[in-house]
Image (tube, rainbow, N blue to C red):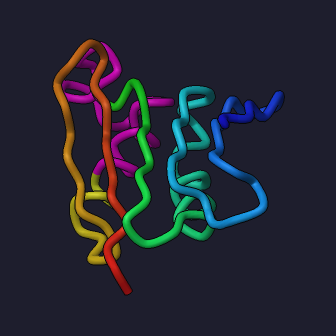
Amino acid sequence: MFKKCKCYQIKILDKNHLTCLIIYNYVQGNYPNYYKLCLELLRPGGIIVFDNSLYGNRILTDLTSEPNCYIHETNEKGAVDNRVTSLLLPIGDGCLVLRKNDE
């Protein structure tokens, strides 16, 4: 059963156990902070999805303005972080899908 957090629109599967799935689609400026938080909550094999990861293709042309710089930072973290397997889907405004690797 999914539960929606009123403040941050994080959907969590069973808050009493390690999380299996987190979908984050809220304040892009907080993406780097929530990347770290989500990894702490996520069980091995669990999935994190960050929406708007291409931000209308603005990420491809402008990496310095807000919120583009934060989205780009999160995309880059996912690409180099050996704790996760990442996939950037060019669907809509883009989805960064991360699977936490087994420990």
State the residue in front, 66 or 35: 35
Q: Position of residue 102 (x, y in %)?
A: 34, 79
Taking depth in this image into account, of 41 and 73 the one nearest to the observer is 41
Identify the image quadrant of residue 89. top left
User: Where's the N terminus, which quadrant?
Assistant: top right
Q: Locate the C terminus and report the quarter of the image it occupies.
A: bottom left
Residue 62: x and y in percent read 27, 28
Residue 22: x %, y % from top left: 54, 45
Q: How many marks?
A: 0
Q: Residue furthest right?
A: 6
The residue nearer to you, when weighing 36 against 21, is: 21
Q: Name the residue at 31% across, 58% down.
A: 78
Residue 90, quarter of picture: top left
Between 13 and 75, the residue placed more toward the observer is 13
Left or right relative to 44: residue 92:
left
- Tell me: residue 1, above or below residue 39: above
Which contiguous range is marked in magenta? 54-75
Magenta-span inclusion, residue 42: no
Image coords of residue 43 (percent x, y): 51, 69
Q: For residue 74: magenta?
A: yes
- On screen, 45 above or below 96? below
Q: Looking at the image, which residue is at 32% across and 73% down?
A: 101
Image: 62 above or below 92: below
Which residue is situated farthest in the bottom direction here?
Answer: 103
The residue under the point 63% across, 66% down is 18
The residue that appears at 37% across and 37% down in the rendered structure is 64
